[in-house]
Amino acid sequence: MDRLDVALGIRPPQKELPFAELDALYTHILASVEDVERVLEILSVVLLFNPHQAVWSSSHIEEMLSLQQGDATLYLGDLNSIVNTELNSIRVLHASFADFLVDPTRSKQFWINPRARHTVFARQCLRSFQLKGKEDYSLHNISVLIIKKSMSKWCGGIFPARSTISKTQT
């Protein structure tokens, strides 16, 4: 009951943070991962790109991050107690794990910085458009491309469906 009171903010913690034991478990699990940066990159897509989407397709994430088919499942293999990777999908099983990853005071070296990750996502989308021969389009037209092209699978979460970006002069 004391920990619940602390977690709900009813009273301040006396010695430890209310999630110290859980945070220690998550830290231990992530510390044992072979390529933690790649794992955090994959998890950042799952947690930040479209937070209302509970399950992500592994193939969409692999396409977005330029990974080989099956790589996302391999990278996340050590996290099977907290991340489900069955049936070509990726789903974080515990909301507390997502909360841990986006709170720098709790996750420390494993923190997923939402602002930095969204910047990387935007650059990847723009690079993808450029590689597909769309470099002549203005920023105003990017949202139209997203709706019409297959890149809508993952770029739709970065740019608004209706453009709120002002037209650039060409």
Image (spheres, grey):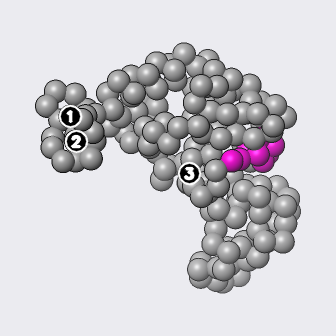
The label number, if any, that marks residue 5 in the structure image: 2
Task: Look at 46% across and 26% down and name the residue there.
Answer: 26
Question: Which residue is labeled 3 in the image?
Answer: 48
Q: Are marks 2 and 1 in contact (CB under 8 Å)?
A: yes
- Callout count: 3
Query: How many neighbours does mark 2 have within 10 angstroms: few (below 14), some (14-19), or many (20 or more)?
Result: few
Picture layout, residue 62 above or below residue 76: below
* Residue type indicated by callout 2: Asp
Residue 12 coordinates in the image, percent (x, y)? 15, 41
Picture layout, residue 38 above or below residue 137: above
Could you tell me which quadrant the C terminus lies in?
bottom right
Prevailing secondary structure of the magenta residues:
helix
Mark positioned earlier in the residue sequence (3 or 2): 2
* Residue type indicated by callout 1: Asp
Label 1 secondary element: helix
Label 3 secondary element: helix
Question: Which residue is labeled 1 in the image?
Answer: 2
Q: Are marks 1 and 3 in contact (CB under 8 Å)?
A: no
